[in-house]
Amino acid sequence: MPILHWLTREEDLKISGQAPYRLIEPVDEYSYGDMTTGNMIIQGDNLDALKALLPYYAGKAKCIYIDPPYNTKSAFQHYDDNLEHTKWLEVIYPRLEILRDLLKEDGSIWISIDDNEVHYLKIILDEIFGRKNFITNVVWQKKVSPANDALWFSGDHEHLLVYAKNKNLWRPNRLEKDATQQKFYNNPDDDPRGPWNSTAYTCAKTAEERPNLYYPIINPYTGKEVWPKKTRVWAFSQDRHEQNQREKKIYWGKDGTAKMPRFKKFLEGSKNVVPRSIWSYQDAGHTQESMIEGTILFGENRFSTPKPEKLIYKILRIATSNNDLILDSFLGSGTTAAVAHKIGRRYIGIEMSISAETHCSPRLRKVIDGEQGGISKIINWQGGGGFRFYRLGTPIFDENGSIRKGITFAQLGAHAWFSETKTPLPKIPDSPLLGIHGDTAYYLLFNGILKDKSVNGGNVLTSKVLESLPRHDGTKVIYGERCLFSASRLKECQITFKHTPYDIKGR
């Protein structure tokens, strides 16, 4: 498989592993509504924020949507969108690595990008997610009218690169027929079952290939016998044809004298349609629409490439179901969170700039209060719900690798568990036993969890401490400050001892 090389590639591949694990601290001032929903807006560098989420949300996001800087040489004030290619790759690669870890096995990632970096991005995504997990390149028609002042071509489209975490497990939701598709349904015979469309009553098989489909039928209006061509026989068996007659699904034309019948398919009860890879502005919105949405919400449009709510709505309808978790680590003005909130999805949004306070939080407050912009009228949004606002706190470990003062057992336990299992800690334990993964039990001796009042607080593995731990007869991994057991005793007890903090590596 081709691999993209750039000047600082080897150093850049290490960035996600070098990013510190930070705390995520709530800020009630910018939170709103029901704060028990689990919806999160995080202000801070998105690499650090993604790393902070790993111990709690690895493998949890059903859908990730990001709209990263495009490297278009049209910089805007929230991100440096004028990065040279090498710098752009340095920024995007480590973030994609962590995003993959946060995605569910049956989840998908959708990335908005334009022509400037789409080909570089495709190669990187092939490397990180696997070429076999590529789903499609959606072309979104972002403009209503052409840019007549363009020197070469009017740039009317953007791309949505779509990958699955595991293509064998991911399936898109089918969509209801849109207004354009519904126009093909009418009711010329005033059928009480409503509008219908018709398809050919024949199929592309010959009488020689399917002799059972070559038979005469009777036109009930004229009484004449009708045969299909030998090169194109009926699409239905004789039994199924008789059923179609009983159900009045055969159309012989307005006056009943058509040479060949057609099969009626009703709009009511018709199957949803498979998503297509070209999205028109009528169906998925356009940039002018999104700028109007921004102006109505904020009284100005500060973002040069905002996405309309209809675009995100279509993505989430295809990729998610009710209560699924959505993640956007380039949140911008908060569109993804707003749409996710309105359609009953949980969400985590990350925004590095002051816009988290000035745009994302106020926008979601309006959503909770029932604002009627964007997709609100389409889905009959009435308001409700809530979110909690967070900022990145101090790193778990200081510059020397030591655990910072004030770190709790639950915080360090989540990191130790993730370091071992690459999964989130299922629940906050009330004992040193973090949990059992496979056949191995994982323990953490830290911060007086054993209620030990000694100098070491029960953080040193001794015979007495071992006796006090919840029992597990299989292999054990125990984290602590020190161990007073010999190597032979550890082997006898099926214990692997690891030192805190040095053996808690995470990603």
Image (cartoon, rainbow, N blue to C red):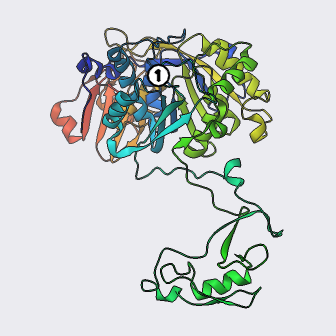
Q: Is residue 136 visible?
A: yes
State the residue at coordinates (61%, 40%).
314
State the residue at coordinates (35%, 22%).
16
Quarter placement of the N terminus: top left
In the rendered image, the vertical position of residue 336 relative to residue 363, given as above or below: below
User: Could you say where residue 411 lies in the image, as x and y percent from the top left?
Assistant: 47, 24
State the residue at coordinates (48%, 15%).
45
Callout 1 secondary element = loop
In the displayed structure, does residue 489 sit left or right of residue 258?
A: left
In the rendered image, the vertical position of residue 74 relative to residue 338, given as above or below: above
Displayed quadrant of residue 30: top right
In the displayed structure, does residue 231 sit left or right of residue 305?
A: left
User: Could you say where residue 182 lies in the image, as x and y percent from the top left?
Assistant: 71, 54
User: Could you say where residue 470 lies in the image, as x and y percent from the top left?
Assistant: 41, 40
Few, some or many C-alpha atoms within 10 Å of disc 1 (few <14, some 14-19, many ≥20)? few
In the rendered image, the vertical position of residue 226 relative to residue 335, given as above or below: below
Please, what is the three-letter code of the amino acid marked with disc 1? Trp
Displayed quadrant of residue 388: top right
Which sits in the foreground, 301 or 505?
301
User: Could you say where residue 78 lies in the image, as x and y percent from the top left?
Assistant: 54, 11
Which sits in the foreground, 345 or 430?
345
Q: Is residue 178 visible?
A: no
Quarter placement of the C terminus: top left
Per the image, the residue denoted by label 1 is 152
Which sits in the foreground, 282 or 218?
218
